[in-house]
Amino acid sequence: MAQVFPKCSNTVATASIIGGLIFLGALGGIADRLNRSPWYSNANVAIEQTVPFSHKHHVQDIGLDCRYCHTSVEESSFAGIPPTKTCMNCHSEIWKDADILEPVRESYKNNTPLKWVRVHDLPDYVYFDHSVHINKGIGCVSCHGRVDEMPLMWREHTLHMSWCLKCHRDPEEHVRPKDKVFDMTWHPDADDPDIRARLMEEYDIQGRTSCSACHR
């Protein structure tokens, strides 16, 4: 009986299988890169707001403490968005006629909240508590980056689960004295390199990596 398939069929079949596996692997790699890119995660992409609020100006130039606006950050899971009254505490006197602040004045006059766009917006299935992290000595800069250098706010990190787990597996790198949590420039002194190890014990910090820690 005549041969149904040509002699090269085995070679073609093998090459097709290998080529298909390489293609799927490459496709998976591309998908992973896209997932971590600013295009998907919005990391390092400045977010437009109703009012172009500059953390750099208010934190670094003026010296406002984070807690002046984010009043509930030490006691609540949510850091808090300041009401317009907080803005007007200063801007009823400073830049009170600036065109750029018209939405703020309008909000205050009509008693309607400003519509801010959440920059660090986690999915509903993720549980995150600001107060827990702050009271364990984790600085704002660990998650939010150098906010005091941001003329417009952006997400410094991807906020992917792998990024969170990296810190949860080795939290010592991010621990600092509780009175330095809001200090954007704090680093351990050269003459006290073991301070973070001592704080890990003092604050009873455990590396929590179980699913229930973040998914409840």
Image (spheres, grey):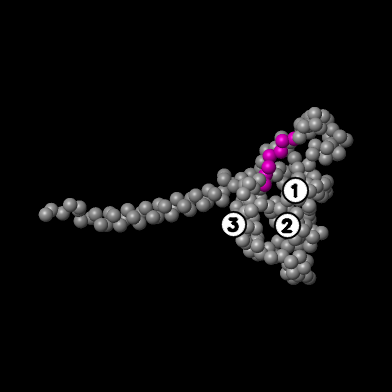
Q: Which numbered tag is attached to residue 133? A: 2
- Mark found first going from the N terminus, 3 or 2: 2
Is residue 115 visible to us here? yes
Q: Magenta segment, principal secondary structure?
A: loop
On the picture, is 162 further left or further right than 150? Answer: left
Q: Which residue is mark 1?
A: 79
> Which stretch is magenta?
114-120
Question: Quadrant location of residue 117?
Answer: top right
Task: Count the labels in the image.
Answer: 3
The alpha-carbon separation of the residues under discs 2 and 1 comes to 11 Å
- Mark found first going from the N terminus, 1 or 3: 1
Q: Which residue is mark 3?
A: 162
Q: Nearer the viewer, residue 197 or 126?
A: 126
Residue at left 80%, top 37%? 84
Is residue 105 visible to us here? no
Residue at left 52%, top 51%? 33
